Image (tube, rainbow, N blue to C red):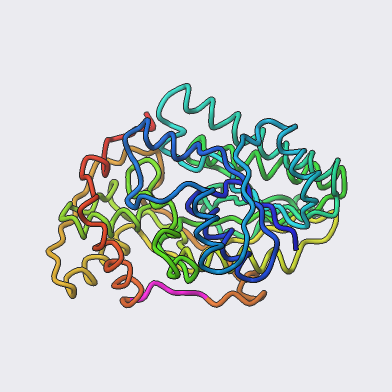
Amino acid sequence: MNVLILGADGYLGWPTCMYFSQKGHNVIGVDNYFRRNETIALDCEPLIPVPNLIQRSRIWKKNTGNKIQVRIGDITNYYFLKSIFEQFNPDTVIHYAEQPSAPYSMLDYDKAAFTLKNNLITTLNVIYAVKEITNECHIIKLGTMGEYGTPNIDIEEGFLEINHKGRKDNFLFPRQASSLYHTTKIHDTDLLWFYIRTWNLRATDLMQGPVYGISTYESDIDPRLLSFFNYDEIFGTVLNRFVIQAVSGHPLTIYGKGNQIRGYINLKDTMQCVYLSATNPAKHGELRIFNQFTEAFSVNDLADKVLTTGKKLGYQIRKKHFNNPRVEKEEHYYNPKHTELINLGLKPHYLTDKILADFFRIAERYKDRIIHDKFFRGVKWK
């Protein structure tokens, strides 16, 4: 396949480029370096210094013989994106090119406005490029389990059959996001669904839970191929942050009671899920939604797992509860369904003691780069 990966410099984007390239596909990665630049501006740079996207593609080719083409530019510019579609004629476009942080979207007006504009315009541009250039192209968009919120009913995979006054119909599962970022992802889903019904396009929307991990099998080839890994409050996810805190001697930062439950997934399994979606594409006129996670844990569950594994490795780890800066339920029912990707062949890497121990060992290599001030700045929703 010709595979176009938007947001190719990011935590998920670069590993996805390597994963598809290693399997023999023609890959082109696009990025505007938003995350690199903004982490510098906000003083929350990643744990591991990684080469830029052009340099990484050269390192990848030198190690594997496989080529990853790179374009640097902003896909909110429709004509830039359209030119890439015209040149490359992708069979699959994987859309990661969105501002990915809930805390960032809640920092101030400017960050909120940027999140809204960037995330919706990039999605609209992808849809139009597919419609105008190659409507056979399968769109894979990264959504988030956070779109659903924490309803007091089971969360189905995307759609819900409603019986009302003797009649029934199938609707997108009700969404109730807890940040502006997550709200933009709801709008993405609505945009896709509208244009699929209107133009007979095809798309897979992956409702992904928080991702954890540093390495993939491809990055094991050369440490310069590791992903863009954040551990800070703004761009880092909770388990990644906990492991780095444990290694550095900082207390684990638990928001509120710590009973908030979410679905989590290993970085390596994200690669599997996206690949399975690409090689088993949706049909024309179909919005296919997969809930992309492998296990559900509370924040306290994760903290306890890190505590247990860390103690076995000789670390003295403390937990500390902070007033929750977010507006969210801390006691809630949570039972999302996630069978479709398993049915397609997903082989999960579950969060075992061994996987956590390996995570600790990789983090230890970069221990001298950890800066405690990045862990908690108190970005508040109110």
Q: Which residue is located at x 58 percent, y 30 percent? A: 116
Q: Which residue is located at x 57 percent, y 60 percent? A: 16
Chief SS of the magenta region: loop
Quick one: 294 or 132, which is closer to the camera? 132
The range drawn in magenta is 348-352
Quick one: 205 or 61, which is closer to the camera? 61
Q: Position of residue 210 (x, y in %)?
A: 45, 55
* Residue 81 visible to an observer of this rendering: yes
* Residue 149 visible to an observer of this rendering: no
Q: On the rendered structure, is 80 left or right of 318?
A: right
Res 154 quadrant in image: bottom right
Q: Which residue is located at x 40 percent, y 46 percent? A: 329
Q: Which residue is located at x 47 percent, y 63 percent? A: 267
Q: Position of residue 114 (x, y in %)?
A: 54, 28
Most extreme residue toward the top, as rendered? 109
On screen, 62 above or below 129? below
Q: On the rendered structure, is 39 left or right of 275?
A: left
- Is the N terminus in the top left, top right, bottom left or bottom right quadrant? bottom right
Quick one: 359 or 191, which is closer to the camera? 359
- Is the C terminus in the top left, top right, bottom left or bottom right quadrant? top left
Q: Position of residue 354 (x, y in %)?
A: 32, 77
Q: Position of residue 347 (x, y in %)?
A: 55, 77
Q: On the rendered structure, is 170 left or right of 234?
A: right
Res 352 quadrant in image: bottom left
Quick one: 325 or 53, which is closer to the camera? 53
The stretch drawn in magenta includes residue 198? no
